[in-house]
Amino acid sequence: MKRIYLDYNATTPVRPEVLEALLPYYRDQFGNPSSVHWAGRQVAGAVEKAREQVAALINCSPAEIVFVSCGTEADNAALKGTVDALKAKGNHIITTAVEHPAVLETCRYLEKTGCRVTYLPVDADGMLDLDELERAITPETILISVMWANNETGTIFPIEQIGAIARRHGVRFHTDAVQAVGKLAIDVQQCNVDLLAISAHKLGAPKGVGVLYVRRGTRLTQFMHGGHQERNRRAGTHNVAGIVGLGKACELALAERETHAGRVRELRDRLERGIFEKIPNVKLNGHPTERLPNTLNVSFAWIEGESLLLNLDMKGIAASSGSACTSGSLEPSHVLGAMCVEVTLAHSSTRFSLGPDTTGEDVDYVLEVLPPIVQRLRDMSPLYNCRQQESCAGCETLKKL
Amino acid sequence: MKRIYLDYNATTPVRPEVLEALLPYYRDQFGNPSSVHWAGRQVAGAVEKAREQVAALINCSPAEIVFVSCGTEADNAALKGTVDALKAKGNHIITTAVEHPAVLETCRYLEKTGCRVTYLPVDADGMLDLDELERAITPETILISVMWANNETGTIFPIEQIGAIARRHGVRFHTDAVQAVGKLAIDVQQCNVDLLAISAHKLGAPKGVGVLYVRRGTRLTQFMHGGHQERNRRAGTHNVAGIVGLGKACELALAERETHAGRVRELRDRLERGIFEKIPNVKLNGHPTERLPNTLNVSFAWIEGESLLLNLDMKGIAASSGSACTSGSLEPSHVLGAMCVEVTLAHSSTRFSLGPDTTGEDVDYVLEVLPPIVQRLRDMSPLYNCRQQESCAGCETLKKL
Amino acid sequence: MYTEKVMDHFSNPRNVGEIDNPDGVGEVGNASCGDIMKIFLKVENNVITDIKFKTFGCGAAIATSSMVTEMALGKTIEEALQLSNQAVAEALDGLPAQKMHCSNLAADALHEAIKNYKATHG
Amino acid sequence: MYTEKVMDHFSNPRNVGEIDNPDGVGEVGNASCGDIMKIFLKVENNVITDIKFKTFGCGAAIATSSMVTEMALGKTIEEALQLSNQAVAEALDGLPAQKMHCSNLAADALHEAIKNYKATHG
Ligand SMILES: Cc1ncc(COP(=O)(O)O)c(C=O)c1O
Ligand SMILES: Cc1ncc(COP(=O)(O)O)c(C=O)c1O
């Protein structure tokens, strides 16, 4: 069967160049970079090279790169480390209602420990109101944590402007850039970012490695206590192969990002146009223009997301959904909820996220397969062409579309 | 040049069978196990299989295995998670003075947050006094954390008896088994262990993955907040390849551990005997019998560890030392310090840790190369055959040997 | 995740549709949990002679709807009332744990339809 | 970690040993920090005509000891007193950051030996 992967925001295959770069570090050069002998020295250099490759991609100094185990850890370390280090200054955090759970759940936990958290709302396109952000700052505010780009909708936040606001008020600024790195140009200097989270597996490197960028001079209580690795900023033996792979992926991203982004954007636009042309009653979720070039999130009225995914899956197409049935919780996507997307439409949201391996044929295949699936599920839905519309509760909510 | 790796306690090469098992998970089966489509389903099964393989090795149920990023994370999660979850019960932790920094530094941090920590002393062989352990238990005690085997000396603690004491007093029991798993038989049921830390790279699997075993019913505050992975016990995208590799390594360990341990013990004993026969004024650090079969830690009087390591390294031999110069801190090994090893001898301690690839030839080569190196460094040392012994402060301390 | 039987009923659902002038109609679930099931009945001499469903919901919701219609067809009202959500799940060789509560409502929809039939046909 | 020059002086240290009836002896460091350096001098007409060292310590400690003896040999007492730990480290093309403070004591040992020479021959 044809296999078309359109879930690059969930994870990406390891790029062949990355695999080739990291393979020697399993057996030939397997040492612990903390060791002083040949086996350690061999790999210590490789870790430092990777640090430079990552630093080059986001325009910081290699010494500001801390290797961690995933994007989630980077977010946890940034938030918890700041709250502990700055507790004398205050306990107020400003974030958004549409962050990834790695930030949101950490904030919920921090609330239990006595922090006050402001969750900024977003508008129907998923965009922030910067005046509202600025008004939320108090003398107690120790951190602004705003994601660079949203994983579900692809909406891009104005990070440079937020960085300027943070600087004006002397507030530390963390950004979860897990979905942005590799897809957008990232410059931590220009955007005045103090802390930034990266996850390797979103840009063609392996799962199990990430980065927390920590601007020089940023006081942060250690999240992982133990050995002296990463200059006492993150304990635990280095994931050498993963780190080498991430370094290589960053090097590739620096060289190819713009070309890839252009190609992917064209394909994504073709998919988007095709869907809206061929299928009625579809809603775009996310900002029409300020959006990751690879991401398309749409709701097909009257059908539920998981059943659509399963049907696509039977045709070899991998996508994802904001329906409760795929979110691991009982509620549909909190991101679409914050955008006030009607709950049935949230359940029917479907995300196509493209990547460097996506082809025009892939897109055409989806456009061929998708319309009949949607129609078949609509025909099965009690909400579609309902004969008792007046008495039907389910139909009520959908009339808004 | 000949290359002889005798630092298996620091890290191990990935076993060929393990590498073979994990390689498909980088490109062919690269999905996110949380995804519902084909790309996710393929790998979700692989993660569950690894869970079973790990569980079989330590005799627990697969549902009690939580995959984390390293041994350090497992220790952090066990300690910090317990302190938060049981704060209503008390705030006293009992551990030992010879734990790995992953436990010790975490305890030091927890002391700053208001915990009381008892660091049990050890005797000259590095062994605990169980009566003292039992006497340390108070109604406030929420956790006993004692490592299964020491990474520097190989001394093995009586985990089954400690588990019995913990059960008798109704106190939770965590053990850092990072050095024990793969080298010793581990049975969490028999030993009444509630929490146990594993690090993959110590048993022939890749760096960047570990396990926290959590006995069913053990309340633990989450360490890493975010997504719903690991049944809400550890957020962050699974390191699928690493997990598959760890599973395979556990399967191999279950099948081969006894045979390997026997072989390695013979080689280690041959090295130990040879060193004591050929070199005078050597001190064994660690328990003479209750010791990991692969570990030999010795101090060569009058010479400093790092310079010995460098000389060995120039001959292709990789070992490690408890000297300050290799510990990343200014003090020599805290483990030898707790055993009251005289400070100069602590600086001269050298650890040889053998593994499944070690051969008799390797051992013979070390025994050929080592004695002249030791003699050369002794000849260079102001403490050796010192002509002004009476007025020399350095010599004073060494007379005890 | 899903058993073969679930996937079979999901991909080839039995008895999809509506019945004109049904003797009974039942609806359960609601939009906010992402599952709505509607069952239509024809009853003759106390026996279910025709049954159809329409479902908005996930794979489990569609498969259980399909399965329950197959199980109920030809049964008497009393027999059909004996059918439980559990029995439907078992007939599908089981459902994933997280679906047992939220999407396993098809028997409830059937019972609602029978209730509606009884109420209107006394 | 170490430069080639450090490794050269570490593997082939110059002027190792003791001097019988030295004109000056200097010792710095102590066992607890893992570095002890001892320097022995022969001085004729205010010039260092022989110099030897013994060192207990890491690679940096041995290399700096060796290097300082090479740098001091043939120098006048005054010139030798100008030699700094920094200069020794530079002559070795640098030392790792964490070694700069703890193992970079060789010039101190030389100065101690000169002090001892002056005190006894002053
Ligand atoms: C925006 C965002 N932040 C954080 C994460 C967490 O990354 P990881 O799963 O690697 O921990 C993800 C991906 O899942 C993400 O999309
Ligand atoms: C006893 C012990 N505990 C914990 C650790 C930490 O493991 P890791 O470096 O994988 O985090 C190690 C190894 O370094 C160890 O030997």
Image (cartoon, coloured by chain):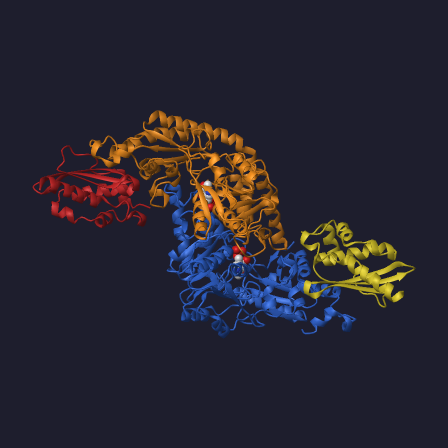
Chain colours: A blue, B orange, C yellow, D red
Q: Position of residue B52 (x, y in %)?
A: 60, 42
Q: Position of residue D65 (x, y in %)?
A: 23, 41
Instruction: Determine if residue A76 is in view.
Output: yes
**Residue at the (51%, 56%) spot, across then down:** A72
Q: Position of residue C73 (x, y in %)?
A: 85, 56
Q: Residue lying furthest right in this view? A: C45
In what quadrant of the picture does the C terminus of chain C appear? Answer: bottom right
Q: Residue lying furthest front in this view? A: B139
| Left-right relation of A249 to A1 | left
**Residue at the (41%, 66%) spot, across then down:** A192
Q: Residue lying furthest top in this view? A: B277
| Left-right relation of B366 to A265 | left
| Left-right relation of A101 to A59 | right
Instruction: Determine if residue B23 is in view.
Output: no
Question: Is A295 rendered above or below residue D31?
Answer: below
**Residue at the (76%, 72%) spot, across then down:** A389
Question: Is A150 rendered above or below residue B59?
Answer: below
Name the image quarter holding residue A61.
Answer: bottom left
Of residues B354 and D24, the one nearer the viewer is: D24
| Left-right relation of D95 to B180 | left
**Residue at the (46%, 34%) spot, across then down:** B129
Name the image quarter holding residue A99.
Answer: bottom right
